[in-house]
Amino acid sequence: MLTAVVSVLVIMGCNQASKRDLKDANKNFKAANKDIKEAMTDADSTAKETATADWKAFKASSDSSILALNKKVDTIKVNIAAANKKNKLALTEDLKKTRQKIDTLQAHLDLRDREFKKDINSYNASMKEKNESFKREFKHDAKELGSALKDIFKDNVK
């Protein structure tokens, strides 16, 4: 009888210990899950801050590039005024087309800037790729416009 009582007490004691271990494991799991969520939030926040800083730097650089292109257009206008009447019309038309392309480039940049500001809260890898793609295209287009401005007088000298 004594053996049966001791056996029941031992079994109950082990059962209590395993319940305690289960509760401790549950607490540890919840704490780890909370830590992971906090780490993900911190990483997400850091990625957004980095992306925002990178975009602001790109936007500032792009705005100054467009300003430089507009200054070149103004300089070329002065040179066109001094050109002979025959070349003046063609040069003015080329310059007008280039100015329109610069304005379009500025409009695309402004549109992408608004989209970036709107979408930054849902920042993810696809948005990062979209930004990088836009930056590559923008730099390429700005470089082409710069070359076109340099070539305006070259085309008409031939």
Image: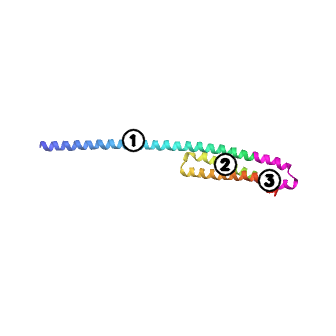
With 9 as the anchor, is 66 left or right in this view?
right
Q: What label does residue 153 carry, if any?
A: 3
What range of the chain is rendered magenta? 71-97
**Label 1 SS:** helix
Mark in front: 2 vs 1:
2
Circle nearer the viewer, 2 or 3? 3
Say what secondary structure mark 2 lies in. Answer: helix
The quadrant in which the N terminus is found is top left
Q: Amino acid at mark 3?
A: Phe
Q: Which residue is disc 1 drawn over?
A: 31
Of label 2 and label 1, which has the lower sequence position?
Answer: 1
Q: Amino acid at mark 2?
A: Leu
**Image marks 3 and 1: residues in contact by CB distance under 8 Å:** no
The 10 Å Cα crowd at callout 1, few under 14, some 14 to 19, many 20 or more, is few
Marks 2 & 1, CB-CB < 8 Å contact: no
Where does residue 84 sit, x and y in percent of width and height? Answer: 87, 53
